[in-house]
Image (cartoon, helix red, strand yellow):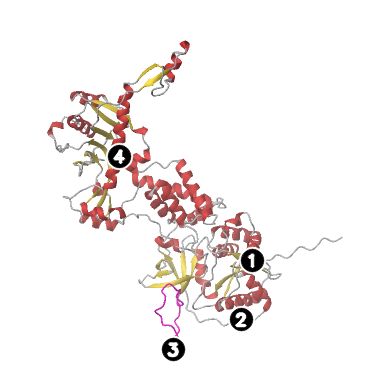
Amino acid sequence: MDSPAPLPSPLKLSERITCVPVVHGSGDCALAVRKWLLENPCDCLAVELPDSFKENVLEAVGELPNPSLVLQRFVPSFGTTWAPDQADGDGDEDEPSSDAWSYVPIDPCQPTIMALRVALGEHWRIEFCDLETNAFEPVAAVMPDPYALRTVSIERFATAILPSIPPPFQSQHVDRIAYMAWRLRELERQHEHIVVICSILNWPWLREAYFEQDEPPEQDATEAPATYAVNPNSLIFLFGELPYITGLYEQARVQLEDDDNLSIDGVKQLLLSARSSYLQDLGRRARRITPLLLRQCLKYIRNLTVLHRRMTPDLFTIATSSQQILGDQYAVHAIETARNYPFYDDMGYPTATLGIDQLRLPDGETVSVVSRLPGQPVSWRSLQIKRRPQKDETEQWKTQWNPYSQCSWPPEDDLIESFRTRVIDRAKALIGADLARSEKFSTSFKDGIDIRETLRHWYDGDIHVKVMPPSVGTLDCAVMLFDTPADPRDYPWRTTWFAEHKEESTLAFYATDFQEELVGPGIALATYGGAMFLFPPVAISDIWRDPRLDFANSLEERIIGAACFHSRQRQIALLSPSPPTALWRKIAKRFGKQFVHLPLGQFNSAMVQQLRMVHVLNGQQVRSYAEHFIRKA
């Protein structure tokens, strides 16, 4: 009994023509196309681009990984007649312009561009078989995430989407499909095996038009296209994937490495690269980005991506997750890293700048543009995050700074005062712990069972309980040393600030030079190295000019000497990374004081780094708008 004949592939239009449907702008789809073409070689590759683009596109593809675009100018028609019921040109500005210029993005992650690279490498014949159109009308629709192509074949992926593909309703779309079908029938007479790369939205209707065998529609008169380099700051509008992920694909291609999982593993590398630039930029002010925090960020990205019904995250998802888990500063570095593309050399082309459906030409003219390889519809969303100022902005702010007017930012005052209260309370608890005692249990557990004493007297069967006496006395001074030993060259700004109201302390500190980092007009940023707090606030002379403290030889000694000199209590709370040195204790003994030491490591490092940041405002009037420029670490 003969076995049944195998079913024909749904991708085959005829014995000589195979159609490979693709999702434009997808790196995963581009990899699937490359794999399919290498496994199924042909003698002619056809792509759905007009023949007028052929020379420029193939030349630009040869320049990869340097990105570019091939732009075709819209030719205005002067034969249009006016009708009384015709709407004028001052309608809704949100409607797409019919006179938009069209361009082909030379993007390494475009499946069509990937197919052209393979064909050039294998020396196949290449044909551009789309209709010449003056005013190109792009066709796009929401598709499933092409990440599924890692485990599903192109044939199964396209077949699964087939029921949801709408028929063409634009007259130009119908004409394009009819023309491509006619061109394929012409090519079929010359080649044995033709592979056509087309949009997944055109695939079923191209098959239908191929069998109808209609006459080809007329083509529009068009101008010759031109090739432009793209401003590196606007590559995110050119690429279908993030520029950083696209760069990883190209690095893997150059180094002959595996690139199958880069759409996901690339996100991890992006976060690690952003961490490196974040730590390099902020230095000691940076919070610790631990593997646990990165894991939480990746988990947040995954959950947010699933909520959006996707398998791979977009830039908004990555930025939102970074902001929520690691703060504004890290999120800014993550966005800047995602926009970074490592391959960019001068190719001699004029440079254009892309935007959202717009392009600025080298002469400054701005035109509306549409892509001839449109990916899935993109929604642009706003993220409440403060950007980093440009260099020219900071230079302008420096010239406008008034050196005779300074004040703090109230939200930071509240945070540091709250932390001072916490340090004082913990120091009081330590003082009380020194007076704690243990006694046998009689009628009350008092402050809890003393396990140590109970085990020590296990032989007599008695239970011992703790007795914690109430805290007595007060502490009016706290010293916080965040960086010891402190280099005076790192902390040139030393001053004393007085309380604006009774809830604030008298504050003396040393910090980095705030004029080196301006974050807004009249807003600068410094980092505490050490500080002294007196509460309730008292009027004191500037400790950095007080001759009575000239015995100090370091910044720490002067802060400690001032605390011992101005404190009215016997004990002083001291927060520092290491215990007080013999010299510090000698200074305290000189004034009849004692330190209650609290190790800095007992407090959350991220919180401490946030508290060390102090924003300096150039006058109280700046407080009205400072929150729009101040970023959290």
Q: Mark 3 falls on what kind of element?
A: loop
- Looking at the image, tell me whether mark 2 or mark 1 is earlier in sequence order: 1
Tag 1–tag 3 contact (CB < 8 Å): no
Name the foreground residue: 590 vs 128: 590
| Magenta stretch contains residue 228 | no
Residue 273 visible? The answer is yes
- Position of residue 466 measured from the top left corner of the image (x, y, whole percent): 38, 21
User: Distance from label 1 to label 3 (Cα)?
Assistant: 43 Å
Which residue is disc 1 drawn over? 162
- Looking at the image, tell me whether mark 4 or mark 1 is earlier in sequence order: 1
Q: Mark 2 falls on what kind of element?
A: loop
- Looking at the image, tell me whether mark 2 or mark 4 is earlier in sequence order: 2
The magenta segment is 74-100
> Is label 3 or label 2 in front?
3
User: Distance from label 2 to label 4 (Cα)?
Assistant: 78 Å
Left or right, 272 with reference to 496? right
Quarter-of-image position of residue 423:
top left
Residue type, mark 1 in image: Leu
User: Distance from label 3 to label 4 (Cα)?
Assistant: 72 Å
Q: Tell me the quarter of the image containing the N terminus.
A: bottom right
Which residue is disc 2 drawn over? 216
Name the foreground residue: 431 vs 545: 431
| Magenta stretch contains residue 80 | yes
User: Distance from label 4 to label 1 (Cα)?
Assistant: 62 Å
Which residue is disc 4 drawn over? 418
Assess disc 3: are there few (<14), some (14-19) or many (≥20) residues with their C-alpha within 10 Å of its C-alpha. Answer: few
- Position of residue 76 measured from the top left corner of the image (x, y, whole percent): 44, 82
Residue type, mark 4 in image: Ser
